[in-house]
Amino acid sequence: MMKAAFIWFIMLMALVSCKQNEEKTQGDSGKIIPREKMVILMAEMQIVEAHIDELRKAGHKTKDSTLFYYQKVFSKNEVMPADFENCLMYYKKDLEQLQLLYADVITRLSELKAKNEELLLERKADSPAVDSAKNVQIEKVETHSK
């Protein structure tokens, strides 16, 4: 009888601790990662993966693994990898929330892409014109109309 009560007590404690872990979106350090920061982290990780894929497609050998670059992302954003993993696991338990999170990541990536394209256009407009056939800088000539 005492043995059965002890087993029930252990099972009850396990259920309570699991329930508490489900309710929190925090990692080993106890730090909760806000949703917006999760979006930033996931977007930066997608950029890292795309960059590494492009390097490999271009024939460059990368010494560092994706995890090396992920560590830089975590460090830059002051997030522990375990906290990120635990928060991601939390979102994976709720498919609707996970889909909303990924939708926000796609929106962020689209915004970053638009900003990058804008900066490239500004840079192109600021640089002197070059005749690509002769590789000669073309001076802008002012015309004066009478």
Image (cartoon, rainbow, N blue to C red):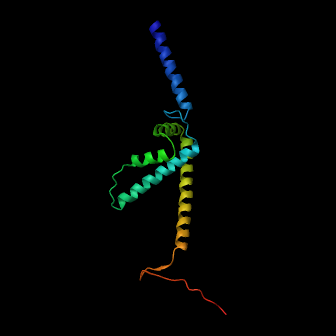
| Percent coordinates x, y for residue 5 in the rendering | 49, 10
Whether 53 is drawn above or below 84: the answer is below
Q: Which one is nearer the viewer's eye here, 83 or 99?
A: 83
Please tell me whether residue 137 is drawn above or below residue 49 in the rendered image: below
Residue 112: x percent and y percent? 54, 57
Closer-to-camera residue (25/29): 29
Q: Say which residue appears at 56% left-offset and 53% top-offset.
A: 108
Q: Residue at x 54, y 38 (%)?
A: 94
Q: Quadrant of residue 98?
A: top right
Dividing the picture into quadrants, the one containing residue 25 is top right
Q: From this viewpoint, which residue is outermost toward the right?
A: 146
Is residue 33 toward the left or the right of residue 69 in the image? right
In-image side of 60 versus 116 (left or right): left
- In the image, 102 versus 41, the foreground residue is 41
Of 53 and 91, nearer the camera is 53
Q: Which residue is pictured at 54% across the width and 47% down the height?
A: 39
Identify the residue at the far top of this view: 1
Decide: is 135 above or below 43: below
Q: Position of residue 66 (x, y in %)?
A: 39, 49
Q: Total number of numbered labels? A: 0
Residue 1 at x, y = what percent? 47, 6
Look at the image and tell me in which quarter the C terminus lies: bottom right
